[in-house]
Amino acid sequence: MAANEVFAPAKINLTLHVTGQRGDGYHLLDSLVVFAGIGDTVAVAPAGALSLTVEGPEAAALSGEGDNLVLRAARLMGAERGAAIRLVKRLPVASGIGGGSADAAAALRALARLWGVALPDERQVLGLGADVPACLAGHPARMRGIGDDLAPVPGLPEMDIVLVNPGVAVPTPEVFRRLERRDNPPMPAELPRWRDAGDFAGWLAEQRNDLLAPALAVAPVIGEVLTALRGTDCLFAGMSGSGATCFALYPPGSAESARARIDGAHPGWWSAAGPVLR
Ligand SMILES: C[C@@](CO)(OP(=O)(O)O)[C@H](O)COP(=O)(O)OP(=O)(O)OC[C@H]1O[C@@H](n2ccc(N)nc2=O)[C@H](O)[C@@H]1O
Ligand SMILES: Nc1ncnc2c1ncn2[C@@H]1O[C@H](COP(=O)(O)OP(=O)(O)O)[C@@H](O)[C@H]1O
């Protein structure tokens, strides 16, 4: 990757417990977040004015976006500065894997380096989106608060991941609106020390994604995606964020063949395989 290019990895909520709601409507979360070696790229070059070009297989979904999160991130760091920004969009938009947040975080990093300025403060970063602080951290984390309270999670076993999206954009606000209970229990106070990937998968099976039921109501096809993933030899499968992207975890080396099988059976679905970043 070129020196002025930053990778914007997909964010996956392996667990997502919704534990409350604040007065302003934002929900309190308790989520185990990881990143994958699957993502967009943001490249920056010196220029007199700020500009953004978007290309890549998922660029069309953003063609009407006058207010791309990458430009919002850039303006946070100084509206008067110029840069030519190039976003290669590979992650499906509005799909529960935080593509926009990952792009914003990557733009912040790339532009801070280009312009020789500090990153914005935590409040400004959170203002770009609840997932942006986690994406800026970029390592496995326990995410609490509305997304602003982050603790590193070391010791994850080595695993590969397959992401599958059925091509239905699921708006996050609508999924939260359909949630029936907002005061669900959090994850255990202390996360265990997992012995291996099997032990980790067993633990994940005892956790939840509280947004799964409301997301299924918005996009029933999510159920088909989960069935397809569970039909492969995976360790664990679930839905990320507010959907519709679902994931499955595998021992290292066995994800791509599972992805290819799902792609063969469902050529209209988006899919990708890669390592879980640790
Ligand atoms: C649900 C999560 C879980 O990681 O992921 P995605 O499904 O978006 O990937 C995130 O909290 C989403 O983060 P992000 O997409 O950055 O959210 P924002 O732009 O700040 O908010 C979009 C909308 O989601 C709702 N929202 C978001 C975060 C939160 N803690 N409580 C909420 O209620 C609000 O309705 C808000 O208007
Ligand atoms: N660079 C970007 N990539 C994706 N979405 C963006 C971007 N900039 C702005 N958006 C807007 O942000 C919304 C959420 O996008 P995204 O982060 O992909 O969703 P999610 O967090 O559910 O995966 C989209 O509906 C889109 O309108």
Image (cartoon, helix red, strand yellow):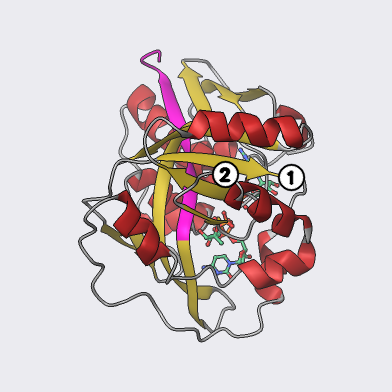
Residue 130 in the image: x percent, y percent? 50, 59
Residue 105 in the image: x percent, y percent? 44, 41
Answer whether residue 13 is visible to the viewer in this image: yes
Quarter containing the C terminus:
top left
Residue 231 in the image: x percent, y percent? 61, 48
Pick the residue in front: 29 or 130.
Answer: 29
**Rendered view: 245 above or below 204:** above
Cβ–Cβ below 8 Å for labels 2 and 1?
Answer: no
In screen coordinates, is 20 left or right of 67? left
What amino acid is found at the position of numbered circle 1 in the picture? Pro
Pick the residue in front: 144 or 247.
Answer: 247
What amino acid is found at the position of numbered circle 2 in the picture? Thr
Pick the residue in front: 173 or 73.
Answer: 173
Q: Residue at x 52, y 47 (%)?
A: 248
In this figure, which residue is indicated by the disc labeled 1? 166
Q: Secondary structure at mark 2?
A: loop
Q: Secondary structure at mark 1?
A: loop
6 is within the stretch colored magenta: yes
Q: Main secondary structure of the magenta part?
A: strand
**Rendered view: 165 above or below 6:** below
In this figure, which residue is indicated by the disc labeled 2? 232
Q: Residue 62, labelled with which disc? A: none
Q: Residue at x 46, y 15 (%)?
A: 46
The answer to which of marks 2 and 1 sits earlier in the sequence is 1
Is the residue indicated by label 2 positioned so its CB lies within 8 Å of ligand 2?
Answer: no
The range drawn in magenta is: 1-14
Residue 244 in the image: x percent, y percent? 67, 53
Quarter containing the N terminus:
top left
263 is within the stretch colored magenta: no
